[in-house]
Amino acid sequence: MPKLTKRVVDAAVPAENDVFVWDEDVKGFGLKVTPSGGKSYVLQYRTIEGRSRRYRIGRHGSPWTVDGAREKAKELLHGIANGADPLADRAAARTAATVADLADLYLSEGPASRPNKKPRSWETDRALLKAHIRPLLGTRTVKSLTRTDIGRFQMDVAEGKSARATDAKRGGKRVVGGKGIAARATATLKAMLSFAAERGIITESPAIGVRLLKQEKVERFLSEKEVAQLADAITKLEDAAKLPPAYAGIFRMLMLTGCRLGEIEGLQWDWIDAERGMIRFPDSKTGAKVTPLPSPTADVLALFPRREGDPFVFPATRGAWGRISGIPKAWRDVRTAAEMPELRLHDLRHSFASFAVADGAALYLVGKILGHKQASTTEIYAHLRDDPLKAVADATAKKIAAAMKGSVKPE
């Protein structure tokens, strides 16, 4: 078995059946000569399951020289050793001609290649693909996309070109634009195109080098008066049977704990250690964590007795997905009744932190309660530490100013 060289390739002659000339250096790499005289480079390999497969690298001639084909064979063998299957990837590539096709492939097979990405993140990707990427780019072929196209897509979303109303029967939601949504949608598009490059659908992601839009973060902190106003709105809607008790309970728990929505709406009884006043989350946005369970939450939890066969604290009101699907509309009703139309659910978490910091709590401890992994994440509350200092300074200065006025006497 010789080493494949240009001389060996040129000397290979056709026969009645296909002729194979295998390379002595790279296992499985060879030249195929058809009865008609066509010559192409191939790679014979076994999948991780043990199936024997043959991959056609390309026809001999430009651009495939024997040396180039050999390097490609080495590259493929490296991937095969790590579980890849070039033939399966090529078949998948044929079914991902358009961006819409690629989106289907990404959502169905992407989780296997990104096992550490959380299910909620995949649901977010699915929503962004449906709302923005499919409407604006779905019919485009993946291979035709350029960096300019990706940048233009981001600006189009920011300007609201994908914004539209959805079915009013499902809560009257709207697909909106803006810098934040545009950046998140573009990040999802970049991740999907990286996946396409890994699968060999494209040679390189056209999104490389595209910078995501930055938005000014407007942090909303509730005052004590606003907290009372919001709590009153929740109670009145619940009493009028316009707000399911489960949602009212979730909103109250968010106000009292500073937890994220996903942590509370999916809270399970087995995670609660009432004796020690702790919630032990087996998973969260930042991984497993233990967070304090403040004593005032006992009054909220007492309204939801444990149900046999149901591990969740708050019962779903719309079936398996009720815990998630009904909350956005319920929150819109609450903030409208409280006359705070701009208030986001996540602002309840910010407000919890703001009350703690303004009361003198150390940023490190506030970060531990909120489950921040990086201290820099908690720094957005640093300015609130100045509020008590300012109050003292103001009171002192007023006294001094009054004394100064009293001591100034005209001559």
Image (cartoon, rainbow, N blue to C red):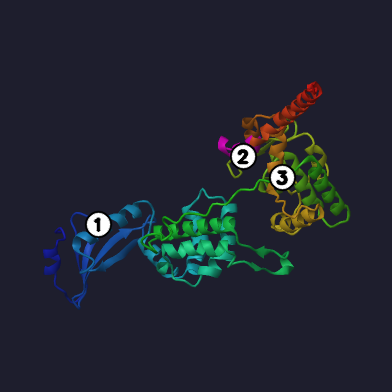
Q: Calculate the distance from the C-alpha at mark 1 to the C-alpha at mark 3.
A: 57 Å
Amino acid at the residue labelled 2: Ile
Q: Which mark identifies residue 168?
A: none
Asked whether residue 377 is drawn in magenta, I would say yes
For label 3, the residue is 348
Please state which of residues 24 and 114 is positioned toward the viewer in this rendering.
Answer: 114
Q: Which residues are magenta?
A: 369-382
Dot 1: within a 10 Å radius of its alpha carbon, few (fewer than 14), some, or many (20 or more) residues? few
Task: Report whether 3 appears left or right of 141.
Answer: left
* Residue at point 40%, 57% (across, down): 198
For label 1, the residue is 71
Amino acid at the residue labelled 1: Glu
Task: Report whether 118 appears left or right of 316.
Answer: left
Which mark sits nearer the N-terminus, 2 or 3? 3
Q: Which quadrant is the N terminus positioned in? A: bottom left
SS under mark 3:
helix
Image location (x, y in percent) of residue 42: 26, 64
Q: Which quadrant is the C terminus positioned in? A: top right
Q: Nearer the viewer, mark 2 or mark 1?
A: 2
Dot 2: within a 10 Å radius of its alpha carbon, few (fewer than 14), some, or many (20 or more) residues? some
